[in-house]
DNA sequence: CTTGTCGAATTGTTCAACGATCCTTACGTT
DNA sequence: AACGTAAGGATCGTTGAACAATTCGACAAG
């Protein structure tokens, strides 16, 4: 039975060194080890990771295209520091992607994933683990967008949230930021679940307006 | 008057050789000089363009991230040949991005750009220049999406349309494909202009369904 | 017809080198 | 004090060469 081995095909394409380097750097950036605005020296990093400068530069190109790094000619690469305008644009995209998502009739499985993310967030909040609240919240919105059932949209959202994480890394207290939205997540899911897409969309718009306002207000990129 | 010099800022950041190489290759791919599925040899292309292999590889990474090239480890880069599944996904994204666009109240300027694209397409059709019809049509949809007023969404759409162009390059007669949509473009613009967003959205959905069906039917990636 | 083996061709990665550009500092001019 | 200039060092941009790793096709063996 040679059946459906083609499904395992993705696993076959291993990754090159440059891609693995990009994975490492992406993790480091997303966890805040490399802070927004910080310069990443080709020499020191290539030496630290034990790869050549050329390979590292290929990795830099990848992350630059994901908007995590800022490539300035002859000056090197910097961890991107989103501007206020960037934040506004990120929320414009969110309104479009999440808005389209909540208007769709959700499958049982997708809904389950969403509800689990909400539950995780509340559980983490109860345990005062605001780091976990943040990641659960991100999982929630990622799951929400996955209602569109489009790999490309999922990928776009992944990048968007990674970029948004940069914003959180320069905020003074990102923890308290998520708190007001735990309840709203529940309500939003309720509207979706009960088949009222237009109400859900309207509620979401207000949700995002609120979040955006809070975020912009607390965000000072020129700290 | 130091006013609004910040607008010229992008022009300040010149481009590296790798980026310029990427521009050239992108043009060549989009015009069909390099055909989908074709392998791009590092040696021959780097020699032909007079750049080193390392620099060319950086350019390849950029285009790979735009989904124009397919990087297969140890086998080289190939001009991407979208699958039928890819086409379906591209239309999912279009429905989301264009759908959100037509629901927005358009500015006078944006509307003018859109109408001009429609007019250009009709003019080209009258002159039997189906190449020009295709590009005008693409301009139309790009302008439509720009109603979202989001740089990131514009960029996403640009990449999406570049990818769609790959699909057209493997079709037998992409010319006749655009013809039925000239009239629909007019109608759609009319609905937007007269401030009936929901009707426009509904009409657009039908529009995209129709286009997708035609395209899938005529598309045979395994030629 | 299937499987194993060999060799050519191409990619993956590294390394060293040099010019180009930027940043800093210092110095002099107005 | 503000500005222009010059020198120096650091880092990036790009190149060319080299070698290892991998793929692919051809051909021999079973």
Image: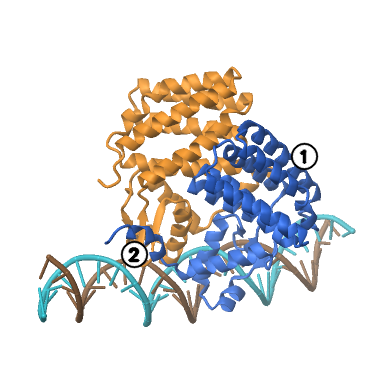
Chain colours: A blue, B orange, C brown, D cyan
Q: Please tell me whether mark 2 sits on a helix, a strand or a loop.
A: loop
Q: Quadrant of the C terminus of chain A?
A: bottom right
Q: Please tell me whether mark 1 sits on a helix, a strand or a loop.
A: loop
Asked if residue A145 is positioned above or below residue A58 in the image, the reply reads: above
Asked if residue B74 is positioned above or below residue B81 in the image, the reply reads: below
Pointer 2 chain: B
Q: Earlier in the sequence, mark 2 or mark 1?
A: 1
Task: Choose between A217 and A178: the one closer to the eye.
Answer: A178
Asked whether residue B95 is in view, the answer is: yes
Pointer 1 chain: B
Residue denoted by label 1:
B1
Asked whether residue A146 is in view, the answer is: no
Foreground label between 2 and 1: 2
Residue denoted by label 2:
B75
> What is the x, y in percent for residue A67?
60, 54
Residue count near mark 2 (Cα–Cα under 10 Å), binned few <14, some 14–19, many ≥20? few
> What is the x, y in percent for residue B119?
46, 22
């Amino acid at each position: 039975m040679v059946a459906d081995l083609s499904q395992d095909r993705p696993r076959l394409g291993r990754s090159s060194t440059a891609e693995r380097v990009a994975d490492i750097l992406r993790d480091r950036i997303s966890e805040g080890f490399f802070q927004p605005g910080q310069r990443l020296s080709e020499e020191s990093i290539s030496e630290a990771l034990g790869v050549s400068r050329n390979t590292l530069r290929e990795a830099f190109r990848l992350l630059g295209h994901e908007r995590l790094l800022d490539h300035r000619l002859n000056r090197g690469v910097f961890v991107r520091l989103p501007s206020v305008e960037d934040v506004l644009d990120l929320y414009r995209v969110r309104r479009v992607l999440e808005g389209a998502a909540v208007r769709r009739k959700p499958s049982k499985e997708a809904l389950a994933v969403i509800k689990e993310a909400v539950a995780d967030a509340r559980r983490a909040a109860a345990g005062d683990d605001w780091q976990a609240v943040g990641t659960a919240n991100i999982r929630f919105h990622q799951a929400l967008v996955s209602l569109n059932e489009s790999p490309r949209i999922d990928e776009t959202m992944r990048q968007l949230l990674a970029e948004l994480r940069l914003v959180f890394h320069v905020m003074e207290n990102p923890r308290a930021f998520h708190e007001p939205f735990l309840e709203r997540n529940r309500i939003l899911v309720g509207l979706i679940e009960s088949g009222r897409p237009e109400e859900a969309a309207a509620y979401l718009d207000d949700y995002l307006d609120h979040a955006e306002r809070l975020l912009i207000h607390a965000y000072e990129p020129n700290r």
